[in-house]
Image (cartoon, rainbow, N blue to C red):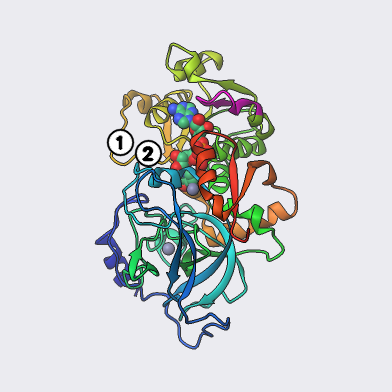
């Protein structure tokens, strides 16, 4: 069975942020599993959703029909969601355009119903939908070194459900595209069960929703990928939620010098709460920021983590690490079709360049324990939340991010 799925998938996928077509998924089907018990189970649910109709135009709250979950799918009542910069990229057309679309991939909710074959989730479970999934069976899911699940790894070009190549969202029979395996800017969404993580039901969904993308990515970029040593130096490029979580991860790992790099001077004051010890604004220097960092660190930082999506910042993040042992980790999602270049001598001189999706965490395996860390006060989330708006004001959350105002804005579906 695995070989069959693998053959189907290899026809269409090439990388974590690659385009793809769809194919039938038959792997998750199991017999004798209880179907659903909620009163809406099996029915189409009309609900409110924020639809992106055109690049860069405000989202429009529409009544959308959400079809029931099919084989290995889960329908979730979304309670809270937030805007990550990746939503902004796809909204403003820097990513592959696929309008009309329901964006959103940071969210938290409650399972409304499950499709045939779903055995690890049931109605009423508190869950985080995650843009990159975990089938549990492929070589990546079985390897402790990877979260690039062959079946469900992140693929923003995918606009339909894996099971039948169709959308579960429609308006007057016009299909509305899915986004990043999740589509959370809607009161109800349908997600593959491999992208749904069951969490502690005591956890406040209006806080832990931010763990379903940005914070986990930044933390993991530091703790799982960059792995700074105690008393080492780390440069973090971009002090949004991902970068601040990376700084927090570096602080937790014991880094003593954390240099925040951002074009927005307003970001520094707040970044101190996340362990950032000094600030470099590339706009204030007439030489490349990698040179500035090399000068202030006497040769370069031990680690750097890029969280901007800007290819020039990616090059700077790589070139600012120290020869011999420096490691740079890229998190940012670049505009479609962009490339960067750097001298191969940077590698020959023993600098290492890496990248990560979702901080190398496996969603189903690792996310529940991050939620538990928050519950036991070992992980702070509240300080990442700068704004709250009702769903009807979702465009304000986009405005905050466009203006670089605040960190994460929680959107409540109930207000
Ligand atoms: P954000 O908009 O909140 O923060 C980005 C920050 O980068 C801003 O403060 C901005 O001023 C700064 N910045 C932009 N260009 C810069 C440059 N050239 N030099 C220095 N600073 C610069 O965004 P976010 O939600 O924190 O996301 C950050 C990046 O991470 C985005 O590209 C997003 O798409 C990506 N992302 C990747 C993953 C992943 O799994 N790899 C997950 C989440 C987000
Ligand atoms: Zn994201
Ligand atoms: Zn897998």
Could you tell me which secondary element the residue under label 2 belongs to? loop
Residue 281 image point, x, y percent: 52, 20
Q: How many callouts does the rendering have?
A: 2
Q: Quadrant of residue 375?
A: bottom right
In the image, which residues are magenta?
Answer: 257-269
How many C-alpha atoms fall within 10 Å of the one at disc 2: few (<14), some, or many (≥20)? some
Task: Respond yes or no on whether mark 2 lies under 8 Å from ligand 1.
Answer: yes
Residue at 55 percent across and 50 percent down: it is 393
Where residue 252 sits, quadrant-wise, is top right
Identify which residue is drawn at 33% across, 54% down.
Answer: 99
The spot of residue 172 in percent (x, y) is: 36, 70
Q: Is residue 131 above or below residue 121?
A: above
* Pick the front one: 244 or 29: 244
Residue 289, can we see it? yes
SS at badge 1 = loop
Does the magenta run of residues contain 291? no
């Amino acid at each position: 069975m695995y070989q069959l799925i693998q053959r189907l998938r290899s026809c269409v996928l090439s990388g974590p942020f690659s385009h793809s077509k769809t194919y039938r998924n038959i792997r998750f089907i199991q017999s004798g599993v209880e179907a659903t018990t909620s009163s809406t189970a099996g029915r189409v649910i009309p609900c409110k959703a924020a639809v992106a109709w055109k690049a860069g135009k405000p989202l429009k709250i529409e009544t959308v029909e959400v079809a029931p979950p099919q084989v290995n799918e889960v329908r979730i009542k979304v309670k809270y969601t937030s805007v990550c910069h990746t939503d902004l990229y796809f909204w403003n057309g820097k990513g592959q355009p696929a309008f009309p679309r329901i964006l959103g991939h940071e969210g938290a909710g409650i399972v409304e119903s499950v499709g045939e074959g779903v055995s690890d989730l049931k109605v009423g479970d508190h869950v985080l939908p995650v843009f990159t999934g975990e089938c549990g069976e492929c070589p990546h899911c079985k390897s402790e070194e990877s979260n690039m699940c062959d079946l469900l790894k992140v693929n923003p070009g995918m606009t339909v459900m894996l099971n039948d190549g169709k959308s579960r969202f429609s308006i007057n029979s016009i299909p509305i595209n899915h986004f990043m395996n999740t589509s959370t800017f809607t009161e109800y969404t349908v997600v593959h069960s491999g992208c749904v993580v069951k969490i502690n039901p005591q956890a406040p969904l209006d806080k832990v929703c931010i763990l379903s993308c940005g914070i986990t990515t930044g933390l993991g970029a530091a703790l799982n990928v960059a792995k700074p040593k105690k008393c080492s130096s780390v440069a973090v490029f971009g002090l949004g939620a991902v970068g601040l979580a990376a700084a927090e991860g570096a602080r937790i790992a014991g880094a003593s010098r954390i240099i925040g790099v951002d074009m927005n001077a307003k970001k520094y004051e707040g970044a101190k709460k996340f362990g950032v010890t000094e600030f470099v604004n590339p706009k204030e220097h007439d030489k490349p920021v990698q040179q500035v960092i090399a000068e202030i660190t006497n040769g370069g930082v031990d680690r750097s983590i890029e969280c901007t999506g800007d290819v020039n910042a990616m090059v700077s993040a790589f070139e600012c690490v120290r020869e011999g042992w420096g490691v740079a980790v890229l998190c940012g999602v670049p505009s479609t079709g962009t490339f960067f270049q750097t001298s191969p001598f940077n590698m020959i001189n023993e600098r290492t360049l890496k990248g990560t999706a979702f901080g190398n965490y496996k969603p189903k395996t690792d996310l529940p324990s991050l939620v538990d860390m928050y519950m036991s006060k070992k992980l702070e989330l509240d300080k990442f939340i700068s704004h709250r708006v009702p769903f009807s004001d979702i465009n304000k959350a986009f405005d905050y991010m466009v203006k670089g105002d605040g960190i994460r804005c929680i959107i409540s579906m109930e207000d």
